[in-house]
Amino acid sequence: MTDIDRPTPSDRRTRQRPSKSGKMALGPLPELVGYNLRKAQVAVFQSFQNAVSPHDMTPGQFGVLIMIKENEGLSQSDLGSAVGIDRSTMVAVIDRLESRGLVIRAPSPNDRRSYALRLSPEGEKLLDELIPRIQAHDKAMVKDLSAEEQAQLIDFLRRISRAG
Amino acid sequence: MTDIDRPTPSDRRTRQRPSKSGKMALGPLPELVGYNLRKAQVAVFQSFQNAVSPHDMTPGQFGVLIMIKENEGLSQSDLGSAVGIDRSTMVAVIDRLESRGLVIRAPSPNDRRSYALRLSPEGEKLLDELIPRIQAHDKAMVKDLSAEEQAQLIDFLRRISRAG
DNA sequence: TATTGTTATACTCTATAACTATA
DNA sequence: TATAGTTATAGAGTATAACAATA
């Protein structure tokens, strides 16, 4: 799991996704929750890219930034286990965010082996701008669902995650 | 998107995924449909691995096999656009399935540029075995939802995909 | 000219193993 | 001894560009 960035295969801002599976036979796939889950997620992730454009941000990166903002001073390892990725993988993730000037690797006051991660002022600023846009985008994704249905959907999804 | 195989980062059959995000503050994430969608999908994909074990099959590969079974003789390009990936990417996907003896690149009768893909007898056999297991696994994932809720969930997800 | 499969190239995600500096 | 960050290595997903064979 965990793909910090999953839906960003290419950065060359050139998304095409016609999926002409129109005349294709799909067998048992359409009846599988997993199949529909994946398709919905793909749709959401793709439009996410547009929603945050031109900021080149992925859902995974956004999640990491939120996590750092909400838990200032946490270590890379702690962040990794929270997000579900190995600490060795987290290195490059933070490398990118740091090189973009969004995250700071501050020295940890108590443990000289680890960093205390925090957002830079630019990171804070970006997040302040992105949060409302991403929330709006999220609402737009479920605009065809009534308020009650949206709540049900989230409830269903959480129950699935818990069941895991 | 498309990730044919997304949730299979490592093949070293050693999945750990505690996600001790227990005491972590998550800010606005839990309210986002996209966030819950991703978490649910991760849960499903991971247990999928167990469900098909020891067959080393990913949801994406399973989808490709189904597509070939249901549309015998289709070309790599057609398969690629159906699944949503580039034909250059499809090469390696089919390479793997072919090297595992599951898929055959038969010459296309009409077009000498392309292949007519089809399942090998082993591919057919594997699919016959996997389909019921995967269907059972899928049902198990939503065992906490009533039949009506399951139907609603799939309906919601399809509406989101359409909205894209 | 356009299309199919392919290869070369380039990112990203992800993991394991091993190393360094610290605890 | 154990842990945090790192690097080396490896494998998969994904794309674009360009090329040969074929349409």
Image: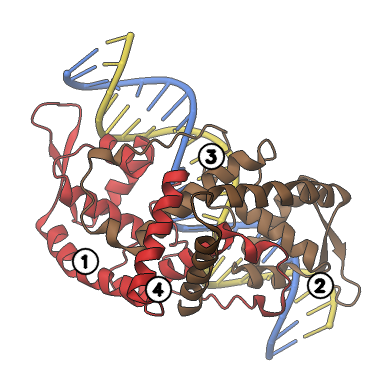
Chain colours: A red, B brown, C blue, D yellow
Circle 4 sits on which residue?
A47
Marks 1/3: CA–CA distance? 32 Å
Dot 2 and dot 4 residues touching (CB under 8 Å): no
Q: Which residue is drawn at 65% across and 71% down?
A: B82
Which three-letter amino acid code belongs to the residue tagged 1? Ile
Q: Do labels 4 and 3 share a chain?
A: no
Q: Nearer the viewer, residue B156 or A115?
A: B156
Percent position (x, y) of residue A36? 55, 64
Count of labels shown?
A: 4
Please tell me whether residue B130 is drawn above or below residue A44 in the rendered image. above
Which three-letter amino acid code belongs to the residue tagged 4? Ser
Q: Earlier in the sequence, mark 4 or mark 1?
A: 4
Which three-letter amino acid code belongs to the residue tagged 3? Ser
Q: Indicate the secondary structure of the residue bearing disc 4.
A: helix
Return the chain for callout 2: B
Which of label 3 and label 2 is nearer to you? Answer: 3
Q: Residues within 10 Å of mark 1 (few under 14, many from 20)?
A: some
Percent position (x, y) of residue B162? 51, 78
Circle 3 sits on which residue?
B10
Q: Residue at x 60, y 52 (%)?
A: B138
Q: Indicate the secondary structure of the residue bearing disc 3.
A: loop
Return the chain for callout 1: A
Circle 1 sits on which residue?
A131
Please tell me whether residue B32 is drawn above or below residue B11 in the rendered image. below
Q: Which residue is drawn at 49% across and 49% down?
A: B144
Which of label 2 and label 1 is nearer to you? Answer: 1
